[in-house]
Image (cartoon, coloured by chain):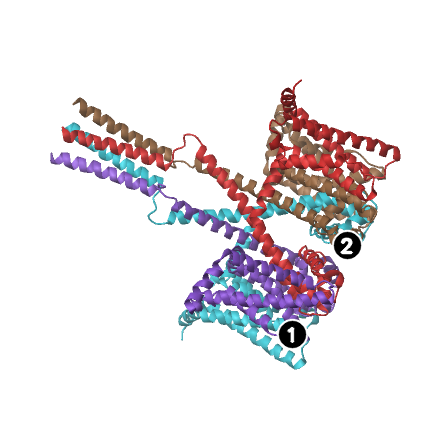
Chain colours: A red, B brown, C cyan, D purple
């Protein structure tokens, strides 16, 4: 059997709905195995799970091979970010890890295999892509928010570091504390503490909350307007595509035609 | 009196506005009885409430019988999910429960009778139906959110189980803890605890909060856009239905008519 | 000077912008006096404040009299809810209160005088009216939310009353506790407590949070869509009012006119 | 070299993209220096940072001079609020501060230099301007919210001051406590405390939460509608600008033209 036949066969296989469903089932099963491992389980079940783990790893290796061999153009395979992600996950999970330090990384890799769900189910891939696409348009709002955070963290770390170094010790800890204030998580405890030294420090917290809430609102509205516009644009497109629908242009052409007829009529008579 | 006469009489009764209002009053009264039982009440009042309970149960049985007998097509009666729900509630509340274990279930059934309010008032039924209809369209966002939760819970249960088994003991407890983090409920306490062992675990919480907030926002916007589109579609429909309103098509027809007249005119003259 | 002259003079006075501004200043001043009273102030200042209070009360009495006498139609004066509110506030603050129990009510009345700001400034009155107008349209969502609260409170009071009577003692306390859960205020403390007895009670809280969040979202979206529609309707109205703008109807009339001319032309020639 | 040549040269320099990028880099570097100072750093590094600080101050002075000299019309330079802000920051950071009290102010000024980022990057300036523009339109909602806060704070300070002076001592502390209640931050602790004295004080908190949430929602919706309208208006403008697009007016003119031709035709024949 030559390579081309293999390629076309594998291409058929990977486009098969049943094959896709089977892969999804294996991913779901691997998710269950991961979940089961977090419970206290007897050693003999743990051994079975170990074998299942190896089986899943091998299945993913075979599935990826099918995918790669089935690809008509090998180069474009790795241009797809999802394929790269799949390959990375499969390759790393093949490396035998004995070291206890690295064992954690191995566990992480096994968990990230669940993310393959997104790379397999087209609707999820579409959803994630559209989420990622919405991000850059919010770039400047995020930048502005970061500047607000940085300035307030710098002020906080300069003034409140002596009061509570665990919350305001340096600029990175201060930023974490400010994120906490932004989520309203026990923010009054943070405030009352600094108000004992600087009685007007409530101004610091209130202005911060107002600024970040306002910026956050702006971001949300930015996304909403963006989504709405896309919907609107698509609607317009569909309208334009709707066959046979008359536009004002069409009417104008009709009237012009009429004008030509009348003018021709006039000319004819004049000649008569 | 034959069955058909009974059916048509009961049909008239159940369509009667006063009957509907009376049923709503009984449901409201049963809600008050349920509420009263949660207070410390003297035993003799409790006896009265017990009798009222039986009376309400009997009334609901009669009302359901009226509804069923009044139904012209018996088969379609149980096709309606609300009728099924009503029947279930009434039948279960008829079962005499003595066992203390089951007594709780009996109490639950009595409480769920208040939900009959939704099945009686058409506006509430409509509202709930439209809420339920909006859900499946959000299916993939909910699935994506579940995948995010599952992966983070697996990571959390793998790494933080030794630090605090009550919060990260297994994957299901970890998911509950993550839901708590998502609602910003004392999430910094959870974070500070794990940061003593893994100083960079704030990354775990921050990325989780960003991802879930973003997915939640997306869900909300999805609902908004969906509702807006429905409104818009309905508006368009109403516009189309608006009697006598002229469209561009009508204008085009008028111009064509004019053209025919002029052409006929020309032809006539040519013949002359 | 007869009554009619007085009426027209007072009407002019109350329509005067300077008079309105002066009333706003007095209201602002009365707000400051109320604020000042909450601080620890020396007794002599307190005496001055007491005199100011009497002066403000008298001024409001005079202002209301001017308003009432200036009103051309006395009957319509009390049909306006704001006027009724003003009269009530002024009349009640005239009653001398010595009793310590009633002193609190007297203080409340003085505070509510600040609300007169809303009845004086037309923009605030407009804003509040539009807010109140939006409420009834949300009636059924609020009713549905109340049903959800009532059922969950009944379940909570039935099952958790023994665990913590302070939170679940009776149905009204349980509803307050559920409102707390809805605002995510230390809701995990409430949950963990009941989970020690009923390990699956997290289902109770999670379903409650999902239902109320979903209903709340629906309410918000309802308001948004409502506001948008109002804006849209107003826009359409403005468009229609825009003078000289041609509609498709106008075009149709023009074409019809043309048709009549051509037909008249034909007839004329036929007669020739 | 005369002043005019210098002006045009500096104008070229300040319009240079590379120069702008370099200024942004220096601002970023100054932000890093500020961040670094909040960590525990050895004294010799601190000395280096001190020198860097002086260097940055000097660079900003030079940059501002270039900007000012490069400005064709000196008067309009200070009409720009951003230029005023830049000048203020640079001038104040030039003042040598030895006093420990004033040292804090000096530190603040250094931190605010990061805000120059906004004055340099045009996109951020645009974003901030649009945020500031949206504020006044919300003026009356903010005023209404302030009135709600003031009245509730006055009531709270009058009734609850004896219960907990730290939360309700005077009207300004009471307003801070109410802001805390509005953010749902441990608001039940505040409520349970006053409920021991006034059992119905939950009404105070619940009505406050409903009113502020409703007003806040209204504000958000106000912003959304405002943004949408701006988008819509811009769209309409673009549509109007789209070259060659026909309107109903154009059609009407075409039909009128036709009418004139036909009428001329009629007249001509009548004359014949």
Quadrant into which the N terminus of chain C falls = bottom left
Which residue ends up furthest to the front in the rendered image?
D1
Q: Note whether B41 is above or below B123 in the view shown.
A: below
Q: How many marks?
A: 2
In the displayed structure image, the side of residue A106 where residue D58 appears, left or right:
left
Of marks 2 and 1, the one in the foreground: 1
Tell me the element at label 2: helix
In the rendered view, tell whether residue B2 sits above or below residue A182: above
Question: Foreground: D153 or A175?
Answer: A175
Q: Position of residue B62 (x, y in %)?
A: 69, 33
Quarter of the image holding residue A32? top right
Q: Residue B187 in the image: x percent, y percent?
A: 74, 52
Counting from the top left corner in percent of width and height, residue B108 is at 76, 40
Secondary structure of the residue carrying tag 1 is helix
Q: Chain of mark 1?
A: D
Chain of the residue under the numbered disc 2 shown in the image:
B
Real-space Cα separation, disc 2 to disc 1, in angstroms = 35 Å
Which residue is denoted by mark 1 in the rendering? Answer: D102
Q: Quadrant of residue A81?
A: top right
Residue at the image point whose x is 61% and y is 35% from the top: A79
Q: Residue at x 63, y 29 (%)?
A: B70
Which residue of the protein is positioned furthest toward the bottom in this rendering? C44
Q: Is residue C269 left or right of residue D92?
A: left
Which of the 4 image quadrants contains residue A87?
top right
CB within 8 Å, label 2 to label 1: no
Q: What residue occupies the far right of the structure in this picture?
A: A43
Query: Is residue B117 in sight in this rendering?
Result: yes
Which residue lies under the disc numbered 2?
B192
Q: Is residue C10 above or below residue D11?
A: below
Q: Residues within 10 Å of mark 1 (few under 14, many from 20)?
A: few
Specify the quadrant that holds the C terminus of chain C. Answer: top left
D153, above or below C176, in the image: below
């Amino acid at each position: 059997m030559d390579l081309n036949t293999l390629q076309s066969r594998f291409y058929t296989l990977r486009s098969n709905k049943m094959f896709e469903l089977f892969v999804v089932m294996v991913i779901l099963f691997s998710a269950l195995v991961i979940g089961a491992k977090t419970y206290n389980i007897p050693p003999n079940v743990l051994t079975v799970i170990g074998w299942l783990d190896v089986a899943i790893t091998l299945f993913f290796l075979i599935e990826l091979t099918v995918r790669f061999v089935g690809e008509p153009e090998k180069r474009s395979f790795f241009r797809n970010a999802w394929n790269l992600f799949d390959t990375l996950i499969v390759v790393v999970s093949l490396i035998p890890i004995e070291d206890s330090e690295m064992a954690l990384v191995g566990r992480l890799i096994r968990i990230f295999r669940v993310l393959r769900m997104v790379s397999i189910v087209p609707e999820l891939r579409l959803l994630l892509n559209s989420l990622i696409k919405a991000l850059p348009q919010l770039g400047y709002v995020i930048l502005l928010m970061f500047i607000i955070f940085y300035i307030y963290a710098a002020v906080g770390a300069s003034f409140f570091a002596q009061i509570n170094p665990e919350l305001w010790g340096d600029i990175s800890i201060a930023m974490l504390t400010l994120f906490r204030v932004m989520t309203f998580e026990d923010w009054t405890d943070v405030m009352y503490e600094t108000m004992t030294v600087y009685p007007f420090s409530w101004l610091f917290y209130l202005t911060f909350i107002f600024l970040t809430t306002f910026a956050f609102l702006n971001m949300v509205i930015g996304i909403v307007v963006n989504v709405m516009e896309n919907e609107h644009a698509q609607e317009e497109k569909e309208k334009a595509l709707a066959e046979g629908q008359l536009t004002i242009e069409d009417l104008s052409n009709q009237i012009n035609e009429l004008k030509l007829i009348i003018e021709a009529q006039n000319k004819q008579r004049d000649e008569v």
